[in-house]
Image (tube, helix red, strand yellow):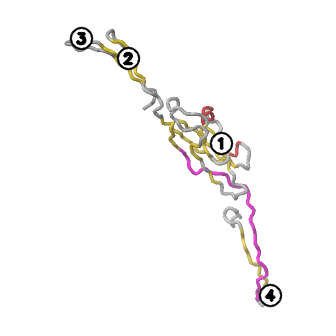
């Protein structure tokens, strides 16, 4: 005989028959059994890894992605609490937080692909009706890649020779005609963007 489980069947109905010796049976009563739900299931994150690429210009205090867990218990007990997994790198909580009620991963602070191009951390889903650390029921890996944006202007540097004069953004070079090939000036161009 299987145990009664609210998540499988919530209501049982049975008819009570009364029979006499002549085997004449009449329906006597309908019996309805309502099964009470218990907090016997924990939330479970169905996706083992979430990954997303965002631009470094992603606005802070905005959602990056959502982690979703399911709990088979009825509505009284199926509340899930989301949090950065214990032991997460301190840097993670500087840049990201989780909404404990819905699993949103929210950007706390402006990102720079030049500083950190990838974040990897775990998010836990716990039963909101339980409160001890041993009640972590499910974790998932979250990877957030940060793409660079073209937010820096290129810089031009003239490495002068004795034949140049620099008037701000104009470089004047004087050479005599019919001279053999020679290095006139060296120009160095840099850009702090990654691509």
Residues under numbered marks 3 and 1 in contact, where contact means CB atoms less than 8 Å apart? no
Q: Residues within 10 Å of mark 2 (few under 14, many from 20)?
A: some
Q: Nearer the viewer, mark 2 or mark 1?
A: 2
Q: Secondary structure at mark 2?
A: strand
**Mark with earlier residue (3, 1):** 1
Residue of label 3: 176
> As rendered, which of 182 and 103 lies closer to the eye?
182
For the point 37% across and 18% down, the residue is: 170
**Mark with earlier residue (4, 1):** 4
Residue of label 1: 83
Q: Secondary structure at mark 3?
A: loop
Q: Secondary structure at mark 1?
A: strand
> As rendered, which of 71 and 153 lies closer to the eye?
153
CA–CA distance between discs 3 and 1? Answer: 72 Å
Q: In the image, 72: left or right of 32?
A: left
Residue of label 2: 158
Q: Position of residue 85 (x, y in %)?
A: 64, 40
The residue positioned farthest toward the top in the image shown: 162
Q: In the image, 58: left or right of 166?
A: right
Q: Position of residue 156 (x, y in %)?
A: 40, 21
**Mark with earlier residue (3, 2):** 2
> As rendered, which of 126 and 81 lies closer to the eye?
81
For the point 24% across and 11% down, the residue is: 176
For the point 67% across and 61% down, the residue is: 7
Residue of label 4: 20
**Mark with earlier residue (2, 1):** 1
> Magenta segment, which residues?
23-50
CA–CA distance between discs 2 and 4? Answer: 113 Å
């Amino acid at each position: 005989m299987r145990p009664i489980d609210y998540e499988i069947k919530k209501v049982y109905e049975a008819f009570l028959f009364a029979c006499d010796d002549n085997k004449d049976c009449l329906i006597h009563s309908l019996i309805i059994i309502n099964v009470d739900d218990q907090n016997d299931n924990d939330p479970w994150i169905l996706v083992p890894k979430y990954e997303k690429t965002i631009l470094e210009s992603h606005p802070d205090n905005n959602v990056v992605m959502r982690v979703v867990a399911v709990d088979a218990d009825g509505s009284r007990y199926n509340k899930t609490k989301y949090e950065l997994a214990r032991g997460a790198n301190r840097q993670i909580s500087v840049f990201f937080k989780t909404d404990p009620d819905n699993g949103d991963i929210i950007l706390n602070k402006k990102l720079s692909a030049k500083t950190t191009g990838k974040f990897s951390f775990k998010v836990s889903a716990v039963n909101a009706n339980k409160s001890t650390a041993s009640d972590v029921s499910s974790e998932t890996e979250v990877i957030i890649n940060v793409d660079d944006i073209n937010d820096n202007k290129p810089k031009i540097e003239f490495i002068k020779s004795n034949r140049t004069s620099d008037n701000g953004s104009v470089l004047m070079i004087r050479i005599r005609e019919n001279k053999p090939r020679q290095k006139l000036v060296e120009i160095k161009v840099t850009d702090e963007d990654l691509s």
